[in-house]
Image (tube, helix red, strand yellow):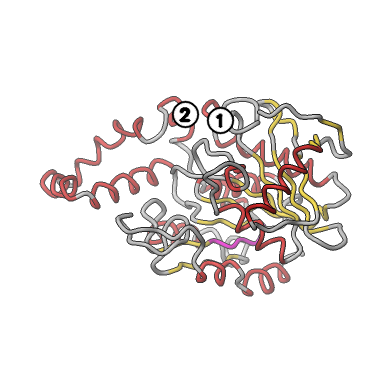
Amino acid sequence: MTEQADQREDTWRPGGGMVSVPGIFMLLLALAISGGPVLADSIELDFDASAGTLSGTLFLPPGEGPYPAVIFLAGSGDESYRTGWEGERRSWFWPELQAWFAERGYAVYIFDKPGVGRSEGDWRKEDFGHRADNALAAVRMLGARSEIDKTRLGLLGHSQGGWIAVKAAARVPDDIAWVVSLAGPAIGVRQQIIEDTVNRWQCDEQSALGLRRAGLGTMLSVMGALGRVVPAGYLSRIVRYDPADDLARMRQPMLALFATHDIMVMPETNVPRLERYFGRDTGNTHLVVETIPGLDHFFRHGSFCLDTPRPQSFDPEFWAALGSSSFWDDALLASHYY
């Protein structure tokens, strides 16, 4: 699932983060020029992880803190979150989410994976355990800051980031209050890649004809072709991951959004698997699932086969689902986390 170094004068801040004063100014200037949401404060905030120093930005909403907070976890690939705020081809995905949470009084922290943007290391040499370690290092860093209410700190993961959010939350149930998964799989990596590959083949007329002639047995050869989907070395580190154990250990409330035209993460296989781990028999009943008709992997309107133009913005139905009162009011208040 494909998504998602300036020289700086750095000074240490309480909580172990690194603050770039010129970075703050340039970020705010870029937002002002673009017409994007200019917040009361935007802080370049780095933290130490096993791969080295990871680079991120903390967005603080207007008003007095301490603020509830959310950490964004990106999907696969090597695109920096900074493309949402810097450069000529700015992406819309993370800035729109950040603005939505800011309007609701949330601080937002987002950081780049190792080797992406200004972060040290190489994400291709990490497995999902390492990515969860990075997320938890960010949780500890934010929790030590006076602006943040560490008792109301959640994780939001998109696509592969949904796996990471679940894995991190399962490890530290007392430090993470909730999880939002946007098109995050509940099946294992191997099955997800096979489903994605089959869907793309079926959307290609010649490939679909070949599949019909060869039969489902052809899928035995799919695993041999997976090296073309992501780097082979990296794939070998993640392909055996299945979130079953992590979902079984989760105790936090979870909001999971899916889309019917998502070619990569299909609701038909992921929703039943997810619901298996939430209910009276599991000890965690605080799950809200929303499946949005007609939207794609990035929650925009478009055809299943990616052959129609896509708007560069979230669909209004996505915002309605993300703001589900069943989750933010009922599920959170019913749990001991809020």
Which span of residues is magenta-colored? 252-256
Q: Are marks 1 and 2 in contact (CB under 8 Å)?
A: yes
Of residues 330 and 230, the one drawn nearer to the viewer in this rendering: 230
Q: Earlier in the sequence, mark 1 or mark 2?
A: 1
User: Which dot marks residue 234?
Assistant: 2
Tell which tag, 1 or 2, sits nearer the viewer: 1
Q: Is residue 142 left or right of residue 146?
A: left
Secondary structure type for disc 1: helix
Q: Is residue 290 above or below residue 167?
A: below
Magenta segment includes 255: yes
131, above or below 176, in the image: above
Numbered badge on residue 188: none
Circle 1 Cα neighbour tier, 10 Å, few/some/many (<14 / 14–19 / ≥20)? many
Residue 297, image x, y percentages: 44, 55
At which x and y percent is residue 192?
Answer: 39, 46
Q: Secondary structure at mark 2?
A: helix
Q: Quadrant of residue 171?
A: top right
Q: Which residue is mark 1?
A: 123
How far separated are the C-alphas under marks 1 and 2? 8 Å
**Quick check: 272 left or right of 174?**
left
